[in-house]
Image: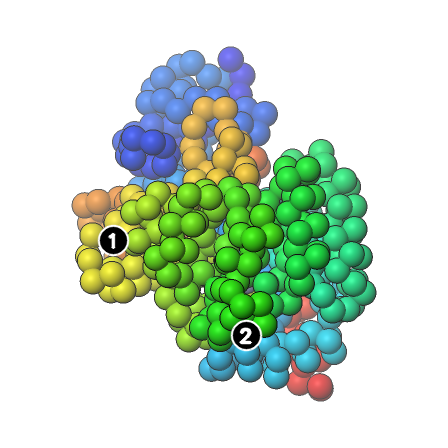
């Protein structure tokens, strides 16, 4: 059988239900999908291709899934540090966005973000930002996978004037990308404190009808909870539950403030948690109780949040933080072990985005979204435990190759679909504009 590509690797962690670690195997790819996972010799005996990549001291893992980002905000990296969420948003980020956001801003920021994510092994991200079409355009240009969590707010912004207009635009975008392989769409109501009951209810019904996720910042800070108690007489999750939004299609971003009842509600409803440890720590928002959620069989995945509150879009680093934070906060060193962390970085993200059938693990029939990490660095030697090396020791600079839908987007640390020099020039240009004020 003729195939497009064979990747031979020393190790493969497919992230399947058996927590397998396979040695001296190859992944065979044809027409964007994985058609076989077999020993090296069998791959070259059975399949014919002129395109064979040999990775002698590497591990192949599923492409990482960044389940919460605001990609264009990469341009605002370092511009508003060391502030709590409320001041960060009200005094810095929102005024800056009001002044500078344009389609050009969104495209340039998204492209910079996509470059950073591919270079650190991410092959799919969920993005909440204005002008989602511009993010989609850059994703398609760079062959990156994205779920556009189109924002909905009560108040006007450059992208829409009313909650109804945001919702209508989301439906149009959903229609436009209905047949896209790289682009999927979700509703992205910003947060319970920025969207009122009527649009939230409408979003719940429409998400059901269109069969798409709802992506929302929720229970991010203690203040969000106390404000909600004052305004609505209940905590935000209870309010979302009353509005019938708490279901398997709900992606709760942050969730640093969960009581026992809420942890149970999440588990019973099958809602997903998008854990953003770096952003939560940097804004001093709180700690998501990942250990307890996972013990209750809740699907927990990972997000970087935007680069204005992280300040990197590096999911490998995020995963290490998540694991270490879970251990110290639960006072249990066995919390979030390496293999579980790998699930959180990959298949759990796919599940939250509703894309589990096509991505998130390296299995026959799935799209070939693959990240190769080299262990040829002193900090990952000797390779006593490859999964441990990925989660606890590897740097993003050890990501050597990345494929998305079988197409190589990173080759030996060099971006194949993005002009790195052009992006750097644009970033410098934006820096200059911010300096001018
Ligand atoms: Zn966010």
Q: Where is residue 286 in the image (x, y as percent from the top left)?
A: 39, 70
**Circle 2 Cα neighbour tier, 10 Å, few/some/many (<14 / 14–19 / ≥20):** few
Q: Which residue in the protein does label 1 denote?
A: 335
Look at the image and tell me whether residue 53 can be seen: yes
Q: Which residue in the protein does label 2 denote?
A: 230
Q: Position of residue 261 (x, y in %)?
A: 38, 55
Residue sitting at x 34%, y 31%: 17
Q: Distance between the residues labelled 2 and 1?
A: 36 Å
Q: Which mark is residue 283?
A: none
Looking at the rendered structure, the number of numbered marks drawn on it comes to 2
Q: Earlier in the sequence, mark 2 or mark 1?
A: 2
Rendering quadrant holding ligand 1: bottom right
Which label sits in the foreground, 2 or 1?
2
Tag 1 secondary structure: loop
Residue sitting at x 54%, y 37%: 355
Q: In this view, does 3 lie above or below 252?
A: above
């Amino acid at each position: 059988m003729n195939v497009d590509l064979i990747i031979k690797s020393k190790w493969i962690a497919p992230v399947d239900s058996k927590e397998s670690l396979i040695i001296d195997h190859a992944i065979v790819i044809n027409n964007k999908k994985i058609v076989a996972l077999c020993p090296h010799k069998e791959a070259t005996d059975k399949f014919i291709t002129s395109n064979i990549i040999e990775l002698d001291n590497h591990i192949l893992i599923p492409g990482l899934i960044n389940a919460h980002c605001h990609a264009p905000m990469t341009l605002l990296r370092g511009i508003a540090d060391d502030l709590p969420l409320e001041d960060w948003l009200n005094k810095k980020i929102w005024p800056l966005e009001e002044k500078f956001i344009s389609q050009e801003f969104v495209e340039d920021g998204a492209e910079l973000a996509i470059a950073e994510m591919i270079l650190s092994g991410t092959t799919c991200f969920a993005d909440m930002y204005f002008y989602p079409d511009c993010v989609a355009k850059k994703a398609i240009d760079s062959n990156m996978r994205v779920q556009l969590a189109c924002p909905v707010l009560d108040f006007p912004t450059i992208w829409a004037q009313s909650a109804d207009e945001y919702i209508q635009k989301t439906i149009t975008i959903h229609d436009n990308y209905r047949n896209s392989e790289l682009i999927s769409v979700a509703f992205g109501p910003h947060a319970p404190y920025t969207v009122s009951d009527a649009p939230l209810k409408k979003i719940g019904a429409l998400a059901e009808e269109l069969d798409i996720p709802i992506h929302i910042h929720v229970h991010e800070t203690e203040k969000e909870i106390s404000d909600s108690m004052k305004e609505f007489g209940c905590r935000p999750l209870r309010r979302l539950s009353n509005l019938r939004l708490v279901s398997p299609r709900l992606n709760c971003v942050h969730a640093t403030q969960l009581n026992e009842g809420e942890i149970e509600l999440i588990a019973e409803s099958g809602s997903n948690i998008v854990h953003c440890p770096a952003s939560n720590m940097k804004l001093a928002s709180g700690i998501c109780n990942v250990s307890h959620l996972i013990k209750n069989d809740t699907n927990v995945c990972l997000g970087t949040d935007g680069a204005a509150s992280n300040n990197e879009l590096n999911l490998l680093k995020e995963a290490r933080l998540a694991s270490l934070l879970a251990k110290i906060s639960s006072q249990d060193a066995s919390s979030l072990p390496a293999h579980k962390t790998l699930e959180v970085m990959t298949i759990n993200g796919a599940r939250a985005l509703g894309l589990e059938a096509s991505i998130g693990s390296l299995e026959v029939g799935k799209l070939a979204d693959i990240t190769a990490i080299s262990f040829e660095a002193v900090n990952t030697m000797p390779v006593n435990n490859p999964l441990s090396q990925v989660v606890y020791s590897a740097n993003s600079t050890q990501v050597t190759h990345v494929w998305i839908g079988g197409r190589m987007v990173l080759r030996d640390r060099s971006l194949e679909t993005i002009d790195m020099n052009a992006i750097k020039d644009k970033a410098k240009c934006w820096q200059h504009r911010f300096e001018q004020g």
